[in-house]
Image (spheres, grey):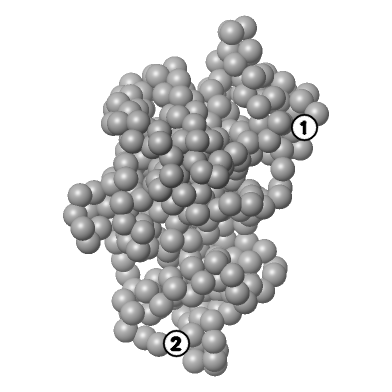
C-alpha cells in the first residue's frame, strides 16, 4: 500500500537537549513545543515486492548513504518488524522549508516517515504508539510533531521507554492570537547535527547538570502560561530556556556555536524592541535561525522590523499548527 502523510514541524518552548538512552532516544528532560502551521514535510511511502532495496528521495535528490539514509532504513526496519513483513520500500519526502538548517526538519520528516510508513505497512497505531514510533526514528522531537497544537514530550521513567511519548496539552485552535515568526538568515546545512551536538554536550559540558536542574521550573511555567494564556510568562521562560541550552552548547568541548553574527543582531533587536514596549521573545534551536513568538496584535510591526534587517533573507509568519494528517496526493 502507498500512503502519504503531511506533518508540521515544531519549535520547543522548553528545549530537549540530551538523552538518557541513545538507542531508544529517551530524553534527560521532558519538553514542550508548539507546532508551526506553515512549515511541513510531505512524505510518501510504498512497500512493494518490486523493490529490491529501499529507495529514499529527499527534496528531489536520491540519498544512497550517510546518516540520514541510515536512520531512514533503520526506521523502515522497525516498521517492518512491527508489521511482520520484509518488503523493501520507496520513500519520497519534501520539505517546504530549508532542510537541516535549524528549523526541525528532522522532527517533521521522521514523524511523517513513521506515520506514512506504519500505515503503508498495514499498521493502525494510536497516537501514543505513533509518538513512540516517531521517537525511535532517531529524532526525538519527531514524537511531538505528530501531535499538533501545544505538545509535551514526557521523558518517562521506564527503561523500555514505554512511558516516553508526547501528549497534546492545548489544541491548535486554543490560542488563535499566538504567533511564531521564523526569521531565516541562512539556508545552509549546519556543520554539526543536533544528535551529534547533544551527545557531545552531555559528555563534555561542565554546565550540563545545571541546565537539567532548572528544567522542571521551566516546564511548570510554560504549562501555567498556556493554561492561563499568560503570554509574558511563556515568552520570558522560553527565551531564557533557549539561552541556557545554548550556554551548554558553547561550553561543550569543542564548542558548538550554532549562532551566526546575524543571529546575534536579531537577538539584540528583539531585546531593544521589548524595551520600547513591543513584546516579542526569541527562541533558537540548534541552528542560526531565530524564531520570535508574539501575539497577533504585534505581529505586523515585529515582522516589518525584522524585514528591515538586511541579514534576514525572509520571514514566515506561523499560527499554531495542526496534528499530522494523511492525504491521497502522493509524491509518486
Q: Which residue is mark 2?
A: 87
Q: Residues within 10 Å of mark 2 (few under 14, many from 20)?
A: some
| Residue 289 at x, y percent in the picture | 63, 38
- Residue found 49% across the figure and 68% down from its top: 71
In this rendering, the answer to whether 52 lies above or below 320 is below
Q: Which mark is residue 232?
A: none
In this rendering, the answer to whether 14 lies above or below 137 is above
Image quadrant holding the C terminus, namely bottom right
| Residue 83 at x, y percent in the picture | 33, 79
- Residue found 49% across the figure and 41% down from its top: 252
Q: Which mark is residue 311?
A: 1
Q: Is residue 296 left or right of residue 266?
A: left
| Residue 215 at x, y percent in the picture | 33, 32
**In terms of sequence position, does the residue under pointer 2 or pointer 1 come before the other?**
2
Asked if the residue under mark 1 is in contact with the one under mark 2, i.e. CB atoms within 8 Å, the reply is no
Q: CA distance from mark 2 to mark 1?
A: 48 Å
Q: Is residue 331 left or right of residue 133?
A: right
- Residue found 55% across the figure and 27% down from its top: 282
Amino acid at each position: 500500500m502507498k500512503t502519504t502523510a503531511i506533518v508540521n514541524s515544531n519549535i520547543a518552548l522548553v528545549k530537549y537537549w540530551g538523552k538518557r538512552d541513545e538507542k531508544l532516544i529517551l530524553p534527560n528532560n521532558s519538553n514542550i513545543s508548539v507546532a508551526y502551521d506553515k512549515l511541513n514535510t510531505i512524505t510518501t511511502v510504498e512497500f512493494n515486492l518490486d523493490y529490491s532495496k529501499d529507495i529514499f528521495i529527499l527534496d528531489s535528490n536520491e540519498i544512497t548513504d550517510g546518516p540520514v539514509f541510515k536512520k531512514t532504513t533503520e526506521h523502515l526496519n522497525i516498521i517492518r518488524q512491527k508489521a511482520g513483513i520484509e518488503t523493501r520500500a520507496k520513500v519520497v519526502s519534501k520539505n517546504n522549508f530549508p532542510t537541516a538548517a535549524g528549523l526541525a526538519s528532522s522532527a517533521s520528516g521522521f514523524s511523517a516517515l513513521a506515520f506514512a510508513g506504519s500505515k503503508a505497512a498495514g499498521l493502525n497505531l494510536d497516537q501514543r504508539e505513533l509518538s513512540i514510533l516517531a521517537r525511535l526514528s532517531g529524532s526525538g522531537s519527531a514524537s511531538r510533531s505528530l501531535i499538533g497544537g501545544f505538545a509535551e514530550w514526557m521523558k518517562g521513567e521506564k527503561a523500555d521507554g514505554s512511558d516516553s511519548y508526547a501528549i497534546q496539552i492545548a489544541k491548535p485552535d486554543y490560542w488563535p492570537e499566538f504567533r511564531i515568526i521564523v526569521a531565516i538568515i541562512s539556508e545552509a546545512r549546519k556543520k554539526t547535527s543536533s544528535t551529534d551536538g547533544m551527545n557531545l554536550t552531555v559528555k563534555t559540558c561542565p554546565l550540563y547538570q545545571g541546565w537539567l536542574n532548572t528544567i522542571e521550573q521551566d516546564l511548570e511555567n510554560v504549562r501555567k502560561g498556556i493554561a492561563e494564556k499568560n503570554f509574558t510568562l511563556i515568552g520570558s521562560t522560553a527565551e531564557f530556556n533557549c539561552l541556557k541550552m545554548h550556554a551548554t552548547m558553547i561550553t561543550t568541548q569543542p564548542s558548538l556555536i550554532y549562532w551566526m553574527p546575524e543571529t546575534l543582531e536579531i537577538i539584540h533587536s528583539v531585546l531593544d524592541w521589548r524595551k520600547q514596549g513591543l513584546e516579542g521573545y526569541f527562541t533558537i534551536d540548534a541552528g542560526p535561525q531565530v524564531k520570535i513568538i508574539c501575539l497577533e496584535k504585534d505581529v505586523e510591526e515585529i515582522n516589518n522590523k525584522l524585514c528591515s534587517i538586511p541579514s534576514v533573507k525572509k520571514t514566515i509568519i506561523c499560527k499554531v499548527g495542526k496534528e499530522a494528517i494523511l492525504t491521497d496526493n502522493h509524491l509518486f
